[in-house]
Image (cartoon, rainbow, N blue to C red):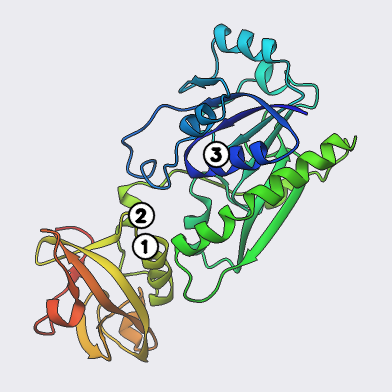
Amino acid sequence: MRVVMFGYQTWGHRTLQALLDSEHDVVTVVTHPKSEHAYEKIWSDSVAELAERHGVPVVIRNRPDDDELFERLKDADPDLIVANNWRTWIPPRIYTLPRHGTLNVHDSLLPKYAGFSPLIWALVNGEREVGVTAHMMDEELDAGDIVLQRAVTVEPTDTATDLFHKTVDLIAPVTIGALDLIASGQTEFTPQDRSQATFFHKRAEEDIRVDWDWPAEDLDRLVRAQSAPYPAAFTFHRGKRLEILTATVSRGRYGGTPGRVFYREGDGVVIVAGADARTGRNKGLAITRVRTDDGRELPATEYFTSMGGYLTTHP
């Protein structure tokens, strides 16, 4: 099939590489310009550079809504558009242009975690599986019929980076498997159960601020979800920003006020956590490594030279 690809960052790069390695003919690539947004500088393999190395025409757009692009796509005469990590709305006249429509590849197990940063949100929420879904695009974002879906297990110590590597390896088999089904003439796919749909926004600074009213288990997942190279979860100590690089749920149960710097346990320093911490039924968050506001990284047992005082959500 003649394929136009819309994509960006490493997700788009992996999709394009899979298409180039397949029997299908990539006739045009549409990608976004480089961005200085913190999250878009992560996993930033260039789709444009890969396309250019293979002699594929490249179009750079923030939004694909102009007449010039539409005419170029008409001239390319695609059988299918394949999109992965395209960050803005694709209008109906474009996604319906190819003979077989548009296939979107999304890194979640749709209908859950439509939208943005699905792996991070899924890890924060304690999901047991994540995955990749190829679905036909329609007028509602990430809502079209599912062509192919594959899942991987979330292990108890997985970070968002671990989940990225697990799911990015699914892109090629899911994409090409879905294209093979479409090329074979299949047109009936699995409708999404919209009663199960969830839709998430982009991650921002406020989403990585630690709230000590959360249970320790949730805070542990937040820290792992914000593992390097993502911006780290942060709190404040004595009015200065403190990033939490690694942490675990404490072995013991610790009572008192959320945010209290309380006890050395093994290689960590336990912080009291949970809105009902006063009951003494909660585990704490044992912080093991931190980064100070001047960029120093050190073990928590070296940073916290004495117990007492509080970690807070604001200075």
Alpha-carbon neighbours of circle 1 within 10 Å: few (<14), some, or many (≥20)? many
Residue 202, above or below 286: above
User: What residue lies at 19% left-to-right and 58% top-to-bottom?
Assistant: 314
Give the number of callouts. Answer: 3
| Mark in front: 2 vs 3 | 3
- Residue under label 2, please give it: 230
- Residue under label 3, please give it: 12
User: In the image, is 78 to the left or to the right of 251?
Assistant: right
Q: CA distance from mark 1 to mark 3?
A: 22 Å
- Residue under label 1, please give it: 227
Given residues 91 and 239, the one toward you in this image is 91
User: What residue lies at 38% left-to-right and 70% top-to-bottom?
Assistant: 219
Residue 180, above or below 139: below
User: What residue lies at 47% left-to-right and 56% top-to-bottom?
Assistant: 120
Given residues 26 and 66, the one toward you in this image is 26
Disc nearer the start of the sequence (1/3): 3
Residue at the far right: name it.
Answer: 185
Secondary structure found at label 2: loop
The answer to the question of whether label 1 and label 3 lie on touching residues, with beta carbons closer than 8 A, is no
Secondary structure found at label 3: helix
Alpha-carbon neighbours of circle 2 within 10 Å: few (<14), some, or many (≥20)? some
